[in-house]
Image (spheres, helix red, strand yellow):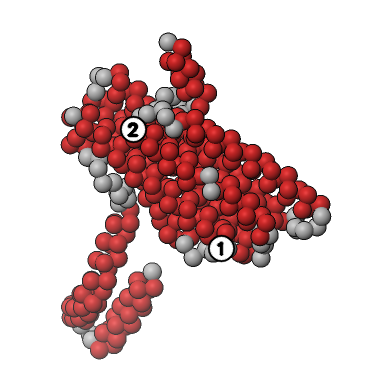
Amino acid sequence: MVFSIVLVVFRTTIVSAFDRVFPENPQWSFATFNLIYNVIYTLVLLVFLTPSVNLIEKIIKEKQPKKAKVNYIDDLLIITPLLAIENALKEVFDMAMMAWGNVECAFTGLMNEDTSESKKIDASESDIDDITRALADYFIKISAATSSKEHEKLLGGLHHVINDIERIGDYAMEITRETEYMKKSGAHFLNQTKEELQEIYSKLPEMFSLALESFQTRKTNNLERIAELQAEIEGLIASTRDVHITRLNSNMYPVEVSKSLYSALFSLERVSGHIVNVAFSILSDTGSKREAFEILRSKKQG
């Protein structure tokens, strides 16, 4: 806009000057002006050509859809559905490790009141979201290429699994956001509260490891232990909430801290819930613990 205004002013000024130089010959004045104006205009465009091209390329590049950072899935494999599924399972496993890495990083930040890893977690979560969408599309393509009911059942369950893994990553983000809020507001957990949160969290690594093992091997050996760990986590969370109320009533905490504590507890509870869903997906398409145990009981009775 500014460049256009400058050109208009420049053109008007030069035209007036040429009219004064050639008052008796307007045709010569106009022809000479056009020649000089076009030469100058072309030189100016040449000066700004490279920056303009770079700007246009940047705009076009930014508008292009972002490609997911996948390592195993490839449309060429879809003609062999079994191989495509095997590679998709590897991708799901890697995505699960990314989500868990975010949980570890986010919880460490919460305990240390440190937000230095926030950008790293954000970037990883963006990759997880991209991979989730890529896998969902891939499962649809495999479904269209296979007539196996067994494959269809597995793919239906995998849709739920990738959503559960993506939600684990989301709750890692929630913990990070709460850490940022606490730093900004100057809120702090008591050491006792940190110890209670740490005890709750300490159950999750074993739970996650057993769940991934179950998901990979499709064996049910770990399901009872996973359910026990979830029950322990729920009990500890309930106990921590009760103790917090006592501390509030004793004026050991400002009321504002409750928001952050309840958010952290809820996030840990939901992470454990989604881990359970991943594990129990080997028996239930939706990851339902109750449905999975009913299937196990019927198998034992049969």
Q: Which amino acid is tagged 2?
A: Thr
Residue 222 place in picture, x, y as percent: 44, 32
- Identify the residue under disc 1: 112
Quadrant assignment for the N terminus: bottom left
| Mark 1 burial class by Cα count in 10 Å: few <14, some 14-19, many 20+ | few
Camera-side mark, 1 or 2: 2
Using the image as rendered, state which of residue 177 and residue 44 is in the foreground. Answer: 177
Marks 1 and 2, Cα distance to the nearest angstrom?
Answer: 36 Å
Q: Residue at x 64, y 39 (%)?
A: 235
Q: Residue at x 49, y 34 (%)?
A: 225
Please, which residue is most extreme toward the bottom here? 21
Q: Decide: is 177 above or below 25.
A: above
Furthest-right residue in view? 250
Q: Is any part of residue 34 visible from this angle?
A: no
**Of the residues under marks 1 and 2, which one precedes in the sequence?**
1
Q: Where is mark 2, residue-wise?
A: 217
Residue 116, placed above or below residue 80: below
Looking at the rendered image, the quarter that the C terminus falls into is: top left
Circle 2 SS class: helix
Amino acid residing under circle 1: Asn
Secondary structure beneath dot 1 equals helix
Tally of marks: 2
State the residue at coordinates (25%, 89%): 21
